[in-house]
Amino acid sequence: MVVILLGPPGVGKGTQGGLLVDALGWVRIATGDLLRAARRDGTALGQEAQRYMDAGELVPDDLIVAMVREHLEALGPDTSILFDGFPRTVAQAVSLDAMLPEIGRRVDGVLLFEASDEVLVKRISGRRSSPEGRVYNIHFDPPKVEGICDVSGSPLVHRADDHPDTVVRRLEVYRAQTAPLVSYYEATPTRVMPVAGDAPMSEVRRRVHEALQEALGVETEAS
Ligand code: AMP
């Protein structure tokens, strides 16, 4: 099974992606997390990506596609994959559609998360992340100890690109470059599953499981 999490920054893709992977044992490919890891490791990719990320712009398609290809090649043939934050442009979606058949796959479904800009800005401003990619929210989903990840014990950070000016730019970039993916996928056999993301985490989780079960027959303990 190959499923894409699509939606604006702050809509809860990362949180729901983490929950789904824990529940279903799928492998998550989150390009934002991979880029942040590359930056921490000081790789050439990380250095190149930095200026785009800090400005709230998209990293060039060829760099992203090469990074995803590398991760896909390392996966076994039966691994179910959850893409989070990829594809983000129609060009990336076209590349993915060319890559997947090489490993006998296709995109089965797109979970399309939606919420108003007001909700998104509030979510992003309260967001804190662990270096391992676990996401909390000081308003809606705080860690047990302020500033510390419940799971790893690492200090939580407020991402540079989660600051207000960059957030506005990231929302514009989403509308201009990523939202066209909805009609791209609607014109293919891929199932597009809208999920209203403006509810508490547990309710959104229930909606996600219900959508996956109804549209794709994915059995989960929560559905
Ligand atoms: P995210 O953690 O998914 O919000 O991504 C953080 C930043 O990483 C984005 O604002 C982009 O600068 C960059 N990024 C992540 N995924 C992609 C992608 N698929 N294409 C281009 N840039 C990306």
Image: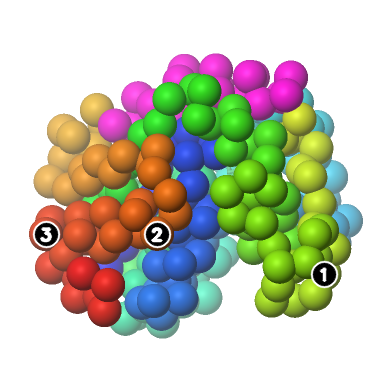
Q: Is residue 215 left or right of residue 122?
A: left
Q: Residue at x 36, y 34 (%)?
A: 114
Query: Where 194 falls versus 156 (above or below)?
Result: above
- Marks 2 and 1, Cα distance to the nearest angstrom? 24 Å
Which residues, given as a range, are shown in magenta? Answer: 164-182
Front of the two marks 2 and 3 = 2
Q: Amino acid at mark 3?
A: Glu
- Residue 173 position in % (x across, y down): 55, 22
Q: Please give the residue where the numbered disc 3 appears in the rendered image.
A: 214
Question: Which amino acid does the dot numbered 1 rest on?
Answer: Ser
- The spot of residue 67 in percent (x, y) is 60, 55
Q: Which residue is mark 2?
A: 202
Task: Please name the residue shown 69% across and 76% down the image.
Answer: 151
Mark 2 closeness class: few <14, some 14–19, many ≥20 residues within 10 Å: few
Q: Amino acid at mark 2?
A: Ser
Q: Secondary structure at mark 2?
A: helix
Question: Image quadrant for the N terminus?
Answer: bottom left
Q: Is residue 134 left or right of residue 111?
A: right
Placement of 8 over or under 35, stated as above or below: above
Determine the quadrant in which ligand 1 lies: top right
Residue at label 1? 154
Residue contact at pointers 2 and 3, CB within 8 angstroms: no
